[in-house]
Amino acid sequence: MFTESSLIQNLRQAGLRLTPQRVAICHLLVGNTEHPSAQQIYDQLRPEYPSLSLTTVYNTLDALVALGAIQNLGNDVSGTIRYDAETSPHANLICTSCNRIIDFHSPHVQALTNEVNDQSGYQIAGARVLYYGLCAECQQLTQPNL
Ligand SMILES: [Zn+2]
């Protein structure tokens, strides 16, 4: 997990101007375990930053992804791209009903990454390990009442 100041440092290195909006996006991402979409970030910050545009949110997220400071998790089941501020090797679990995404830490993820790195001939820059299924809460909701 990057700190807020290291995210800001990354943006500066990418040549982006450090506007209060961009700093606020970094602030929102650090320690965030919700795996937000660009739209969710925009909706959360808009009340405090009325001049914020969705384009700025996307540009900032794209820059941070390109720098390896955050991870693009790909689309959730509604087709929305979600982002993860946790960049250490771990798996993600996505609920196909409520779209919740959680982190799953296991030393096996790092071991698998090492194995792929050693045996594929690729220089691995990152990994996206995503499991799909019903979370515990949604399983209860879909269970028939007996
Ligand atoms: Zn769920």
Image (cartoon, grey):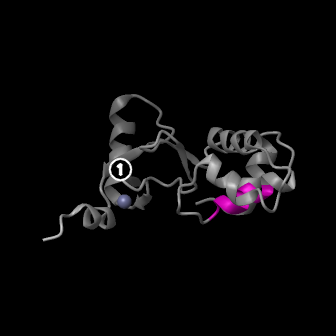
**Residue 84's x, y, as percent?**
54, 53
**Residue 67's x, y, as percent?**
66, 42
| Quarter occupied by residue 13 | top right
Instruction: Judge by depth and name the residue closer to the eye, 56 or 61.
Output: 56
Q: Which residue position is annotated with label 1?
A: 96
> Which SS class for mark 1?
loop
Magenta residue check for 28: yes
**Residue 130's x, y, as percent?**
37, 47
Q: Residue at x 68, y 61 (%)?
A: 28
Q: Can you name the residue that lies furthest to the left here?
A: 146
| Quarter occupied by residue 62 | top right
Instruction: Judge by depth and name the residue closer to the eye, 59 or 146.
Output: 146
Q: Which residues are magenta?
A: 23-30
| Vertical position of residue 55 compared to residue 132: above or below | above
Q: Is residue 9 left or right of residue 119?
A: right
Q: Residue at x 35, y 38 (%)?
A: 116
Magenta residue check for 66: no
Q: Indicate the quadrant containing the C terminus: top left, top right, bottom left or bottom right.
A: bottom left
What amino acid is found at the position of numbered circle 1 in the picture? Thr
